[in-house]
Amino acid sequence: MFALNALSCIGIFVVLYGWRHERRKSSLPAERFVSAIRVGMRFVTHTRALQGVLIRGIGFFLFASATWSLFP
């Protein structure tokens, strides 16, 4: 079983190594990191569905992080 798994991984590596994709030049100027963060935050503040997802995610991880304090 291990040999079959190893062969399947080798096949995936061969395909990924041989994969060539075209790099397209963007006609847009490069965006700076801080301005990209600012645009992303503005997008989140104006998207109601994304706000709900982020609030639920933060709430879950906030309370789930208490589990880490119980580990030795």
Image (tube, grey):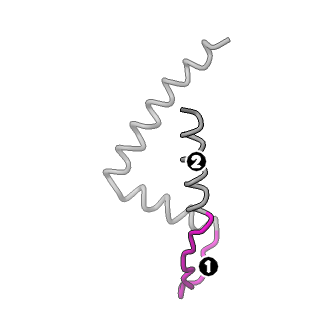
Q: Which mark is residue 11?
A: none
- The residue wearing badge 1 is 30
Identify the residue at image location x=55%, y=18%: 67
Q: Which mark is residue 9?
A: 2
Above or below 52: residue 63 = above
How busy is the neighbourhood of tag 1: few (under 14 within 10 Å), some, or many (20 plus)?
few
Above or below 32: residue 43 = above
Q: Position of residue 25 (x, y in %)?
A: 57, 85
Identify the residue at image location x=54%, y=40%: 4
How busy is the neighbourhood of tag 2: few (under 14 within 10 Å), some, or many (20 plus)?
few
Q: Nearer the viewer, residue 35 or 30?
A: 30
Q: Position of residue 71 (x, y in %)?
A: 63, 14
Q: Earlier in the sequence, mark 1 or mark 2?
A: 2
Q: Nearer the viewer, residue 41 or 57?
A: 57
Most distant residue in the bottom direction: 27
Residue type of the residue flagged with mark 1: Ala
Disc 1, SS: loop
Q: Position of residue 8 (x, y in %)?
A: 54, 47
Which corner quadrant holds the C terminus?
top right
Q: How many callouts does the rendering have?
A: 2
State the image quarter where residue 21 is shown.
bottom right
Disc 2, SS: helix
Residue type of the residue flagged with mark 2: Cys
Q: Position of residue 43 (x, y in %)?
A: 42, 61
Q: Which span of residues is magenta-colored?
A: 17-32
